[in-house]
Structures are given as C-alpha cells and as structure tokens.
Image: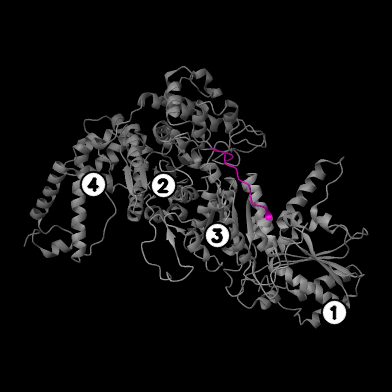
Amino acid sequence: MSAQTDPQASASGLDSDLQETREWTDALSAVIESQGSERAHFLLEQLLEHARQSSVDMPFSANTGYVNTIEPSQEARSPGNLEIEQRLRAYMRWNAMAMVVKANRHNPPEGGDLGGHIGSFASLASMFGAGFNHFWHAESDNHGGDLLYIQGHVSPGIYARAYLEGRISEEQLLNFRQEVDGKGLSSYPHPKLMPEFWQFPTVSMGLGPLMAIYQARFLKYLHARGIANTENRKVWVFCGDGEMDEVESLGAIGLAAREKLDNLVFVINCNLQRLDGPVRGNGKIIQELEGEFRGAGWNVIKLIWGKGWDELLAKDHDGALRKLMMETNDGDYQAMKANDGAYVRKNFFGRDPRTLKMVEHMSDDEIWNLQRGGHDSQKVYAAFHAAQNHGGQPSVLLIKTVKGFGMGKIGEAKNTVHQTKKLSDEDIKAFRDRFNIPIPDSQIAELPFYKPADDTPEMQYLHARRKALGGYLPHRRVKSEESFTVPALDTFKAVLEPTPEGREISTTQAYVRFLTQLLRDQALGPRVVPILVDEARTFGMEGLFRQIGIYNPAGQQYTPVDKDQVMYYKEDKAGQILQEGINEAGGMSSWIAAATSYSTNNRIMIPFYVYYSMFGFQRIGDLAWAAGDMQARGFLLGGTSGRTTLNGEGLQHEDGHSHILAGTIPNCVSYDPTFAHEVAVILHHGLQRMVERQENVFYYLTLLNENYAMPGLTPGTEAQIIKGMYLCKPGAEGDKRVQLLGSGSILRESFAAQTLLATDWGVQADVWSCPSFNELTRDGQDAERWNLLHPLEAPRVPFVAQQLGSTTGPVVASTDYMKAYAEQIRPFIPANADGTARSYKVLGTDGFGRSDFRSKLREHFEINRHYIVVAALKALAQDGKLPAQRVAEAIAKYGIQADRINPLYA
C-alpha cells in the first residue's frame, strides 16, 4: 500500500493522498491569483467554520510563515525623501553615540560611571524616523495629538533628534544624565524631571505597554462621553521583545482586542536580545508573540526581512528558503549578525543545497547586506501605514532588527551591546565611516556633535515634516487650559454634620456621600471618573450603577439579572464608571490615564479609584511611583483599611502598612481619617489643590468599614485637619496628664482609654486626631532642614511641636498601622510646657494579619484601649509621676498576658 492511501501514513503526519492535496492547493493558488489574498482568506475561514460545525476539532494555529505579512506588491510607498531621511538618521545616530560616550569619558574622580545606551537606538532608528517624519501628530488646532510611549533605553536618540530640531541645546547634551544643576537631560523618559518634554515614564519595563492600553481605552471613553474629540488620535507603544516577558506587557492585550482599540499600535522591536543575551535562543520570539497577539484578537503585522530578500523569496518556488527561515532559531540569527557574510553563507544558506545555490551569484558582502526588515525604511513605512489605517482592532508590529545596528565589531548583535557605552577613538572612526559623518580625523578625540546648517536640505526637510504634522514631539502639556471652581465646603454639609441620634456610618459611606454630591455639580460632575475593581457593593457604591452607568463601548446587549431592582447593573456606551473587574493593575492604569488627562488631553478629570487598601500600593506600587513621575492628580482610596478593622478577611487582606508605602512617593499626600467630616475636608482640599490650582499632587485616603456615630466638624479645625493633627477631645483639669494620639478606627480606642485613665487611675488625657502622620513628618523634616541651613534666623517650629507645645504629659500614639507610621514624628515631639523632657510611646500593628473579631485583633496587636492605658501609665511612671506598681496593677486589672509572644513574630 502506498503512502497516498495508507491510513497509518496519514496518522503519522505523512500525506495519504498527494494528488488530492495538490488539487486543493492548486485551487487555492488559483483563487489567490485571480481574486486576491483577501478572498482566499475568506474561503479558508469559511472552511474552518464548516469543519468546526462538522465536529472536526483540530487545534488552531495563530501563526503564519516566518516572512513579512505585507507582500512587496501591497506595500504603501513612502512619500518621503528616503535619502535625506537616511542622512538625518545617521546624524542622530552619531549624536546619540557621542552623548553617551562623552558622559562616560570625562567623569570626576569620585563621580562613577553615568551609564547610558547606544545599541537600543541603533536598533530602532529607522522606525523612529518613519514615525516622526510621517505618522505622529503633535497637538494642533485640528488634531488632539498622538501619544508616544517611547522605549526608555532609546532616550539618547530622541534627544539627538530634538537637538537637530533646536529644542535641546548642546549644553544639555553635554550634561546627559547630569541633572542636579538643572542643565542636564534625564537618563530615561521622566516627566517629573523634564515636564515639557517627556509624556510617559517607560523604563520600568512592562508598565508602558500596560498603561498605554488603558490610555487608548480612556481616549475612547472621553470621546464616548462627549468630553473630547479623540477619534483621530493614536497611541503608539514601543517595546522590546525581551520586555514582553514582563507579565504587565501582555496582561491587558485581551482588553484591547475586546474593546476594539483601533487607536492603539504596539511596535515590538524584535532584535532577539534581552539586556544580557538572547530572548529565546532556542526558539522564535516573533512567532511566539504572533501567537499571543493574534490569539487575543489583534491585527498582527510582521516585518522580518528587508527588500534584498524579496528577490530570493520570489525564486523560492519549492519553499526551501521559507522552511530554512522558520527552522533557524533566534540564537543562530543573532550569531549571524555578530559575524560576517561568509559566516551567513555557510551557517544559514549552507544548511540546504537549494538555498546555497540561490546565493551562489552573490558576494559575501552582498549577503551581509541583506538587511532585516526594521532597517529598511520603505518597508517600515509600509508596516506603519498598514497599522495606522487598520480599523476595528488594535495592531501590533513585530519588527526584526539588529541590536547595535551599525556599531560593527564593537557591539553589533553582541551579548555585551546593551552595556556598551565607552568607545575607543578607532571604534568612533569606524562608526563615523559606517554612517558617513563629516567629522575629520583631527576631531575624533574631541567627539564633537554634528548639526548641519539651517539652510541645508536635511534641516529644511526635518522641520518641514514636523510642521506638516503639527509640531514637535515628544511634548508635554504642563497645565490644562481649562479652569474650574470647586464648590464651597458647605456644599457637602451632609458629610460635615454630626450623624443623627442613633445613626452610625463608616468613613467609606462618608466618601460615597461626598462623591454623590460632587457628581451633582453641573461643571465638575461630568469630570468625575469613578474607578472600581469589582468591589462596588463592598464599598456601598452600587447606587452609582443606575445613576451614571458603567462604561462599555458596546452598551448593554443583555438583560441584567437585577433589572427589576433600583440599583441594577447598568452598562452604557456613555457610562461614567470604569469597572475593571478583578484587576488592580488595570484599575491603577485607568486611574493614571484619567489623572494625567489635564496634560495628555487638555481636559481636567477627577479620578476616584477605590480598592481594598491591602491591594493598593503593595500590589501596584511600581505604577503608583510612575504616577508620581507623571505628575498625576486624583484620589486613591484604600477601603476596608487597617490591620484590625477588616476583621474577617485574614492575612492577605489586612493592611497595616500602605501609609508607609504611600509616604515613599514625594507627591502623594496621604491621610488616615477617622471621621466623616475629616474625609470631606480632605477631599475638598484635594480638589482645590489639584483642580483649581492644578498642583501636581495626588491623594491617598484610607477608609473604614466600621460604623459609629460621627461628631461633625468643629469650625476652625479645617486647616489643622489638613496639616495632620487637631485636638478633638480635651480632658478635664488634673495634675496627672497624658496626650493620646490616634488615627483611623483606633482613635476611638484612645477615646475609651481616656475614660479608663480618668475613672480607674485618676489621669486626665487630651485626645488628638492625627489624620496624617505622613504629612506631620514632612512638615517636621522641612522645618528641620530650614533650621539647619538658616542658623542665624528664627527657627521654624514643626506643626507637631506647635500643637503639643502648650501641653504637658507623655504622648502615646496608637494606630492600625505599623509602629513605623507614628514613629516618624518622634523627633518633633516637644518638651513639656514647663521645659521638662517628655516621653513618646508608639503602639502599632507590626506582624501578619489574621482573622478574628475586631476586639480580639486589637488585643492581639496590643493597640486597644487597655494597652493605651498601660503605655500611658508606664510613661508617667518613667517621668516620676506614678509608681511603677500602678503599671503592674493595670496589666493585672485588664488581664494582659505579659509573657505572650510578640505579635510581630506570632
């Protein structure tokens, strides 16, 4: 039996009927030739669907051949002058290289290397040339401007272009990575350090792709809600193939496809190298990424080979070359570009006699000059054009390049190229010769920057292209042209007033009431962006579903199960809520997009992102730091906060440290309020700073799920609340006195301790609410710095010292957070009013959380009223105001187990 009819041959992968196979392939070829590839694709899709309906359950492959997606005959032709563009790229390559090498040649003796990267821009130069010359719009009267997430390691190349454009001076180039004196350029894209230049921070790899997806979605959101016309804007994202291993890089590609974000273009630079070596030495990263993105529903465009390969592929009638291209792994491709043409002839084409014969007429130099697609300007233009004009899907360009292209023996495709930053004069000469830079040998040691005269064709072309696209990029708006007036504080009187007799609410409910009132404001209400991660009902926000709707570009195409209820789950094309599902990183990315809208869209938006506090800074701390760099403005709200307040959820839910993490971000203003009126005062002040005054800060508030009566605002304490500390419950007159500090839910334990101290021990206590130990710390540190540097001027007094300066008695602080939170203000605790020393005791929740009733947890972490009393008595005993015996009596009275294990280690 022949292989043509042998069932075993079919099962083993051999063709059981070669003639039938040939008939099918001939038929498909005829369709392609007569009706085109689109018709052929349609027929294949129909056949696959018919097979599925007939229960032919065969695995689907999302991969295509290892060749360019766009056939040469289908390429859109570049309208530009490719010769001039090539010369401009050469000048940029030179200046980028010179900037890095200069920075590392002339270091002071104790300065250390400044670092920098040459190889990354060398790999991407053609792509950036195409984008800047033909595709990327700046903001103008008729275009909102494209948004560029630029791969961080290519910053020298972006600076080199800006230098030719006259936007950056030679002095700044000479101060690359030297920023302290204010003349330099930041190492990577940092909006905080270059506020009018860089749009987004991207060098914390993986965050750029993630943030960009939500940025593209936010543009659609603004358009759907009629706030801004964003329909002609694109978000372009440059990533490295190694960067795609970061889980954030691929984490939201399903969202992009699901919401049809055709305003989003990923450009993945596939130079096959990570920072230390090959990405997939034994595999094929382009094929892997193609499967990931096409499987997720993206439009995938592969650009692998330059035009020199077109002729060879056209002659590849039996598929030998295509087969060889597919079978060669990435590690071998890298090695070929690290060697020469003879090596490629032997180790690539020489693997098959048929392919070796295909290049027998070519010299080794001609073989070497067969470029990868990312270095072919025409093909890059065609790929960009196809992505730019594709509708209904996000697009990803998988473009193959060589890391360190043009750097020759010093780095091209070498594993060490990423770290290459110091070149010898001979290396520099070779670089100059490779790119034909008009610098004489006599100036090589000086390594001068090169900039053609303004009247040269190159410079005229450079400026003309950007003028045609609306102006220069990257460019960042520092302040919005919009202006708003925040409603007066008394607008929120429902939150400021005492709760009625017998009524109890939580600070989470207070926040929801504030938000509901703000949404009613005619001017600011539409600018509010509530962001949730599938916990609306936990935070009592389900009432907003019907009121303002959940954004969904497809609307609500199903009947919700709770349609008959007042607060049913309502999705809407113009919905205002962003409901991200169980997805803290996505929620934070949406928050960043909204919180920076004043800059990216010239539209002031007010995002409120509420989440379990434990899943905030701990889980998305890198994004929170990026938000600080981006000068974000908005509110983060850590709900169900405190290590003992979220009592039943256990170790991975109970937050005792988010305020420590929040304090590490310089422009994050954080509060742990106890009362509804504190929440209202803080939120209102935040609106004034971020919306009215457009200050570059963002706010973090922790909220509680514990209900209790709210005392209401005492007029005159507003400023003290904002500064972080006010007297909320003074004690009676008495000789023995202590000062009790607290925040969040544990402040109420201080109230209970105040009663116990008075009734059981004859000690009076003043109770202070401290909504922000972080702000008190910053104020104190600022005063200390002033006093250090101004020894001849009147010293400044920290606010803590101002508040406690007229009081007497030890100070005891107790919070639902780690001891380090309240410990921060220790240096600013003043002496007693009579000048004697006073002690400071801190209680906190160090250790892992656990589940139990709140009272048991507070006993376990030693922060409840009994421990506050013992700490106060101990401090009085140390000050000689009480005998130590009274402390022992208190420990016995309250049943405290003195020898139990420290909760930090329990």
User: Residue 187, percent across and down?
Assistant: 56, 39
| Residue type pointed to by label 4 | Lys
Sequence-wise, which precedes: disc 1 or disc 2? 2
Secondary structure of residue under mark 2: loop
Residue of label 3: 619
Secondary structure of residue under mark 1: helix
| Residue type pointed to by label 2 | Asp
Secondary structure of residue under mark 4: helix
Circle 1 packing at 10 Å, graded few (<14), some (14-19), many (20+), is few
* Res 430 visible: no
Asked if disc 1 and disc 3 are in contact, CB closer than 8 Å, the reply is: no
Our reading of the magenta stretch's main secondary structure is: loop
Residue of label 2: 241
- Residues at marks 4 and 1, CA–CA distance in whole angstroms: 88 Å
User: Residue 677, percent across and down?
Assistant: 69, 62
- Residues at marks 3 and 4, CA–CA distance in whole angstroms: 45 Å
Labels 3, 2: front one: 3
Residue of label 1: 760
Quadrant for the N terminus in the image: bottom left
Sequence-wise, which precedes: disc 3 or disc 2? 2
